[in-house]
Amino acid sequence: MALAGTNAAHAGHELDGRDLVAGKTLYADNCAACHGADLEGAPDWQVPDENGVLPAPPHDETGHTWHHSNVQNFDYTKLGGAKIVERMGLSSFTSGMPGFEGQLTDDEIWNILAFIHSNWPEDIQALHQTRNPPHE
Ligand code: HEC
C-alpha cells in the first residue's frame, strides 16, 4: 500500500499479499518431511542426534520461528543453516537445515513463510510483528 508523502513501509510487509495456497503446497513438498506436516517439528527436536545435529524445530507457535524476523527466516531458508552459522561465526554448531537457493524462487520462499505465519494465533502474530522493525 503506497500512501502519498509518507513512508508506508511497515513491519512485516514482506508477507503481505502472498499466495497462501501455493505456500501450503510448497511447504508440504519441501519442508514437511523435516518440519512436520502440521508444522509440529521433528519428535524430540530439542535433543541433538548422535552427530550433535539438532532435528528440525516446529514452525508452529511452540517453536522459535516466530522469534525471528521475516528477513532472518527468509535468509535461513534460502541460504541454509550452514551459511548463516558461518556468517555468525559459530563454527561449533552444525546445522541440519539445507539451503533452497536454486530450488525455490524468492517468491516461493515468501509464500511458504506467509503460509507458516498464517497458522500462528493472533497473539503470536502480534509478538512476531515486534521482531520486525519497520523498514523499506
Ligand atoms: C532435511 C531436513 C529439513 C528440511 C527439508 C527443511 N528444514 Fe528447516 N531446518 C531443519 C533443521 C534440522 C533446522 C534446525 C537446525 C538449525 O537451526 O540450523 C531447521 C531450521 C529452520 C529454520 C530456522 C529455525 C527457526 O525455527 O526459525 C527455518 C526458518 C527453517 N528451517 C525453514 C524451513 C523451510 C521454510 C523449509 C522448506 C522450504 C525447510 N526449513 C526445510 C531441517 C530441515
Image: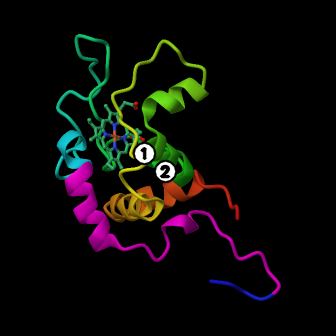
The answer to whether 1 appears left or right of 92 in the picture is right
Circle 1: element type: helix
Per the model, the C-alpha gap separating discs 1 and 2 is 5 Å
Q: Nearer the viewer, residue 43 or 29?
A: 29
Q: Which mark is residue 74?
A: 2
Crowd rating for badge 1 (residues with CA inside 10 Å; few <14, some 14–19, many 20+): many
Q: Which mark is residue 29?
A: none
Q: Is residue 78 in view from this perspective?
A: yes
Q: Is residue 1 above or below residue 23?
A: below
- Three-letter code for the amino acid on which mark 2 is drawn: Phe
What is the quadrant of residue 108 in the picture?
bottom left
Quarter of the rendering occupied by the N terminus: bottom right
The residue under the point 26% across, 20% down is 47
Q: Which mark is residue 77?
A: 1
The colouring scheme, among rainbow, by chain, secondary structure or one colour, is: rainbow
> Magenta segment range?
5-30
Quarter of the rendering occupied by the C terminus: bottom right
- Three-letter code for the amino acid on which mark 1 is drawn: Thr
For the residues labelled 1 and 2, say whether their Cβ atoms are less than 8 Å apart. Answer: yes
Residue that sits furthest to the right in the current view: 5
Q: Nearer the viewer, residue 37 or 96?
A: 96
Magenta run includes residue 76:
no
Circle 2: element type: helix
